[in-house]
Amino acid sequence: MQEIQVLLVDDEDDFRITLAKRLKLRKVNVTDVASGNEAIELVKQKSFDVAVVDVKMPGIDGIETLKQLKQIQPAMEIVMLTGHASIESGMEAMKLGAYDYVMKPCDIDELLIKTGDAFQHKLLKEKEKTSGN
C-alpha cells in the first residue's frame, strides 16, 4: 500500500507536536506546521494526500486555509479539526470541499480512520479521473 502523506496544521504547539508524534508511531508520514500561511507555502512545494487543519487559528483561519490549499492541490483531501463547540465550522468546511471533520480533543483512532478514508477517497477520485478520460 502506498504511504499516505499527511499535513497537520494547528497553532497549538503542544497539541500539534503530540498528535504528530502519535501519528508517526502509527507509521503515518506526517509533516506539521503551526499556521495556515506555513501550510500554504509548503503545499506549493510538496504534494500531500490529506491535510488535517484546525478551524480556529490566528491570522489565516482553517476555512481560508482550506480554500487556498484546495486551489493549490485540488486532489488533496482535508479533514478539519474543530473544537470550541463549533460543529457549524466543520459543516461549513465540508460545504467548501473538506472531506470530513473531527472534534478536538480528537481521538487518535477516529482521526486515523478519517484520514485513511479521505486518502482512499482521493485514490478513488484519481482512478476515476484516469479511467474516465
Image (tube, grey):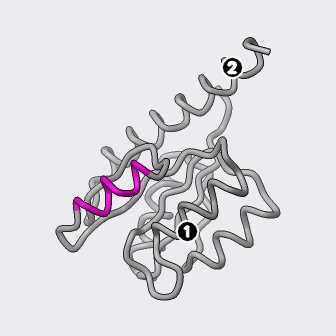
The main secondary structure of the magenta stretch is helix
Q: Residue at x 40, y 80 (%)?
A: 14
Specify the segment rendered in magenta: 87-95
> Label 1: few (<14), some or many (≥20) within 10 Å?
many
Q: Residue 9 carries which label?
A: none
In the displayed structure, 122 sits above or below 92; it is: above
102 in the magenta segment: no
Q: Is residue 87 left or right of residue 109?
A: left
* Depicted 120 relative to depicted 92: above or below: above
Q: Is residue 73 left or right of residue 24?
A: right
- Considering the numbered disc 1 on the image, is that residue within a helix, a strand or a loop? helix
In magenta segment, residue 93: yes
How far apart marks 1 and 2 lie (CA) works out to 26 Å
Mark 2 residue element: helix
Determine which quarter of the picture holds residue 32: bottom right
Can you say which quadrant of the picture contains the C terminus?
Answer: top right
Mark 1 lies on residue? 65
Residue at (59, 59) in percent of width and height? 7
* Kind of residue sitting beneath label 1: Thr
Residue 107 on image: x %, y %: 27, 53
Alpha-carbon neighbours of circle 2 within 10 Å: few (<14), some, or many (≥20)?
A: few
Q: Nearer the viewer, residue 87 or 8?
A: 87
The structure residue drawn at horizontal position 60% and vertical position 23%, both measured from the top left corner, is 124
Spot occupied by residue 1 in the image (x, y as percentages of width and height) = 64, 26
